[in-house]
Image (cartoon, helix red, strand yellow):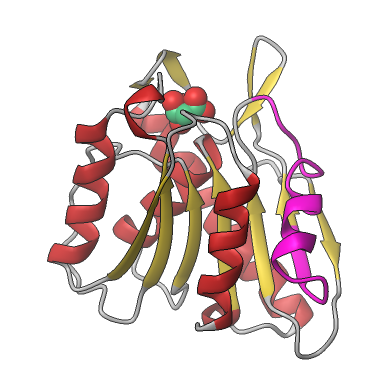
Amino acid sequence: MEEMKYIYQAGKPDGKKFILLHGTGGDEHSLVELVNLLDEEATILSFRGGIQENGMNRFFRRHGLNQFDFASLEKETDTLLKEIREISAEKGIPLSEWILVGYSNGANIAAHLLLERETELAHGIFFHPMSLEVHTQTFPLESKKIWVSYGGEQDPIVSTASFTELVEVFRKRQGKVDVFESTYGHQLTMEEVQAARTWLKEL
Ligand code: MLT
């Protein structure tokens, strides 16, 4: 199994602890500035997706827009979890202290990780995620709290149905979900970063 590329930056002891997962075409640096806006004292563990699609980094393969390669999804989810466990053990950070922060493709693998692998990982901020429609697990998600944003009907990638399904599956399994809706499509806006920051303060 190949090791994933990542950056780790220790923050202040009281700062949040974020695991960052970029969108298609990003890398381990893409979300760092954004996360500084969420908490300037944060500890950061930021991964680079190990899959290449025409030179763009992703966290799992697809065969076309929203035509996911489910074998790749499962394999890469296992690799990501293994890396998170190893780095957390090395740095002495319990899994329960991390907040997964993902955008688009990174949000999709992060949500899949919470739904399909029973771990102590419990928190997520997911910008523009969608349902990958994989539901093999039923363990309760009562300890999980996620904040998710959606770009409305203008989003060319995430349909209302797919976003709603993701929210519903978390809620049906007792996960706590806060939803932020914008009208700017798939792009990340300052408004949603501010909303996520407010949510974090109450976490
Ligand atoms: C995905 O492939 O995970 C979604 O379509 C989002 C994206 O385009 O990255």
Residue 190, position as x, y percentages in the image: 65, 47
Residue drawn 56% across the image and 72% down it: 198
Q: Position of residue 81 (x, y in %)?
A: 53, 59
Left or right for 35, reference 203: right
Q: Which residues are magenta?
A: 25-45
Compared with 150, 160 (above or below) is above
Q: Point out residue 104 in the picture as x, y percentages from the top left corner.
A: 51, 37
Position in image of residue 138 (x %, y %): 15, 64
Seen at 73% across and 59% down, the residue is 35
Q: Is residue 48 magenta?
A: no
Judge from the rendering whether residue 27 lies leftward or rightward of residue 73; answer left or right: right
Q: Is residue 98 visible?
A: yes
Let me know if residue 100 appears in the view. no
- Number of numbered discs on residues: 0
| Of 188 and 61, the residue lying toward us | 188
Query: Residue 142 or 40: which is nearer the viewer?
Result: 40
Name the residue: 41% across, 14% down.
65
Say above or below: 78 vs 42.
Answer: above
Please tell me which residue is depicted at 17% across the width and 68% down the height of the picture: 173
Location of the N terminus by quadrant is top right
For residue 114, above or below residue 29: below
Left or right position of 164 against 30: left
